[in-house]
Image (tube, helix red, strand yellow):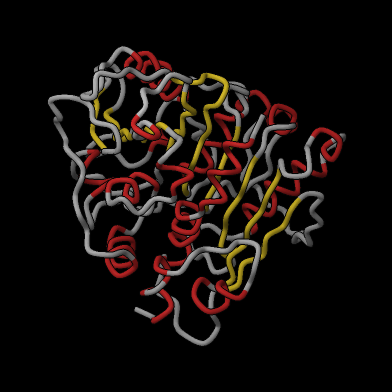
Amino acid sequence: MSWFVRYLFFVPLMLQTCSIGNALCGQQELIRSPIQLNLSSRRNDDHYSDEQAIKFDKPQQQVNRRHILQSSTVTAALLQQLTSPVISYAAEEPTQISRGTVFEIQDPNSYSAVVYVPRAKDGAKQTSPLPLLVVLHGAGVNEHSAMYEFTTPGGDHTNLPPYLLSTQQAPASLSDNFVVVAPYVGQGKRSLYDEPRSKILSFIKWFNTQIESQTLDDGTNISINRQKVSLFGFSEGATLAVELATTRQFQGVVTASYGFSGTLPKMAIERLQGIPIWAFHSKGDDIYDVQCSNRLVESLLSYDGGLDVFAVDDIKYTKLVPPTTEKIEPGKEHVRASLVASRSAEVFSWLLSLK
């Protein structure tokens, strides 16, 4: 494991500069709209039709996706060397819901999930509705419970915000402000991408009602701001997040290692117009090529009227450039995009700023 990986989490992340990126993270190119991309002229036959774009009751089976299982070995090795010694704050079956902890819940009609509720600021009772971040994981072996896969070193999905929250390493802009829920596809299943879209949307609706009905261990209740629900997706979860965003039920989207290799249909692009998206992708991604995110961003901004409906900060694109002086382990750059996005205080401050 290279020296820059071991120290990645111990140095403040500065997305606006390249000095830290060059030394630790690989160079980062932060691109803001308007964006000019030099895209390959090679046609890609992976696509889904306009009709499929509006059917959320089943996954898009026609998409020729690579059958990738997210490398738990790579992810675990990265995180165990990137982070300080793990202190577990998670509990699979809490007697009462505690603020500032990660716990597991179960919707009997859909998914189990890990959940985080922020501590009340300055010890005061929470009165205003809180924004919600829905985390969508990528593909995995998924042999264990949701709590294990999201919060235990060696779990398939420990490259995402719930792990940082469970070990008190998440940026304050996330841990102090957001309710976080990460639905889990379930033991023995491969990916949320394979699930019916209506089932995922129903889970989010169920969660909002369920969490608001609970009395926390400090005697308080919380409410969810339905106007400030955002998506954070990794790999196939990023592809899913973009599809769900076309329902226009979400305020903003963060994608890491977006995996749709085709061209979005016109209807999908129309429905995404004006929805803020921040894409993260490494040029060294050996699972889903960076061209996947290039095409996504370019298609949004080149569509008729695209530059008129997006505000200056509505579309952000951070490219990670891997080091050229050492061998890159398979899968590492694919995972690193989500680690960088999850660790970035600016990402969650940006989501908070969206109107």
| Residue placed furthest toward the bottom | 325
Closest to the observer, 210 or 239: 210
Is residue 204 depicted above or below 29 in this figure? above
Q: Residue at x 46, y 42 (%)?
A: 237
In the visual, does 268 lie left or right of 339? right
Is residue 339 depicted above or below 217 in this figure? below
Q: Residue at x 60, y 72 (%)?
A: 27
Quadrant of the drawing holding the C terminus: top right
Q: Taking the image as drawn, is residue 33 in sight?
A: yes
- Residue 224 image offset from top left, x and y in percent: 45, 20
Q: Taking the image as drawn, is residue 183 in sight?
A: no
- Residue 139 image offset from top left, x and y in percent: 37, 47
Closest to the observer, 303 or 27: 27
Closest to the observer, 211 or 266: 211
Q: Residue at x 72, y 33 (%)?
A: 269
- Quadrant for residue 136, please give it: top left
- Residue 137 image offset from top left, x and y in percent: 39, 43
Is residue 285 depicted above or below 230 in this figure? below
Quadrant of the drawing holding the N terminus: bottom left
In the visual, does 212 lie left or right of 141? right
Q: Residue at x 39, y 36 (%)?
A: 192
- Residue 103 image offset from top left, x and y in percent: 24, 34
